Image (spheres, rainbow, N blue to C red):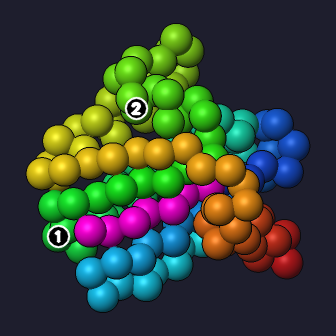
């Protein structure tokens, strides 16, 4: 099973934003740190989810467990619904990606258990500033 830790960071809301993805399991240990431009933190969190799921699919895993410290992302995936229309395209893309896995879990974790992804998201913003 792949464990996919995702996080996002925004310097301002909206502001320069980055995503961090840490994937482990099935012999993988992958770190992704990407600058995604100016956006708000919720959009950045959904972007991290979609990007993490894309990477998991590329690795060919059928068992994927995503961990996120974003309550809105986790709740939206569990309910398969978002109130805010701005988030809908991201949710739809994530749900489409999830349908390609045999087994998918998503779990909310506290910040303290998501430090690797958080550091990667912050690094993306710092690298863009330098």
Residue 123 horizontal side relative to residue 69, left or right: right
User: Residue at horizontal 78%, vertical 49%?
Assistant: 10
Picture coordinates of residue 61, whole percent (x, y): 19, 67
Q: Which residues are magenta?
A: 1-7
Q: Between residues 108 and 9, which one lies in front from this camera angle?
A: 108
Report crowding for label 2: few under 14, some 14 to 19, many 20 or more residues within 10 A (C-alpha): many
Q: Is residue 120 visible?
A: yes
Q: Is residue 57 above or below residue 104?
A: below
- Whichever of callouts 1 and 2 sits on the residue coming sooner in the sequence is 1
Q: Which mark is residue 35?
A: none
Quadrant for the C terminus in the image: bottom right
Query: How many marks are shown on the rendered structure?
Result: 2
The residue at which mark 1 appears reads as 60
Q: Is residue 118 visible?
A: no
Cα–Cα gap, marks 1 and 2: 21 Å
Write down the quadrant of residue 117 in the picture: bottom right
Q: Is residue 87 above or below residue 42?
A: above
Q: Residue furthest top?
A: 83
User: Residue at horizontal 36%, vertical 56%?
Assistant: 65
Write down the quadrant of residue 14 in the picture: top right
Q: Between residues 27 and 120, which one lies in front from this camera angle?
A: 27
The residue at which mark 2 appears reads as 77
Circle 2 SS class: helix
Picture coordinates of residue 129, whole percent (x, y): 84, 70
Report crowding for label 1: few under 14, some 14 to 19, many 20 or more residues within 10 A (C-alpha): few
Asked whether residue 50 is drawn in magenta, I would say: no
Asked if the residue under mark 2 is in contact with the one under mark 1, i.e. CB atoms within 8 Å, the reply is no
Picture coordinates of residue 76, whole percent (x, y): 46, 26
Picture coordinates of residue 1, whole percent (x, y): 26, 68
User: Residue at horizontal 55%, vertical 15%?
Assistant: 84
């Amino acid at each position: 099973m792949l464990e996919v830790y995702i996080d996002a960071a925004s310097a301002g809301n909206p502001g320069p934003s980055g995503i961090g993805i840490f994937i482990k399991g099935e012999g993988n240990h992958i770190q992704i740190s990407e600058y995604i431009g100016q956006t708000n933190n919720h959009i950045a969190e959904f972007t991290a989810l979609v990007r993490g799921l894309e990477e998991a699919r590329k690795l060919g895993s059928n068992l994927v467990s995503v961990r996120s410290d974003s309550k809105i992302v986790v709740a939206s995936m569990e309910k398969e619904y978002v109130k805010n229309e701005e988030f809908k395209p991201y949710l739809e893309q994530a749900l489409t990606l999830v349908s390609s896995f045999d087994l998918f879990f998503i779990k909310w974790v506290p910040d303290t258990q998501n430090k690797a992804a958080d550091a990667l998201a912050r690094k993306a913003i710092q690298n863009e500033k330098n």
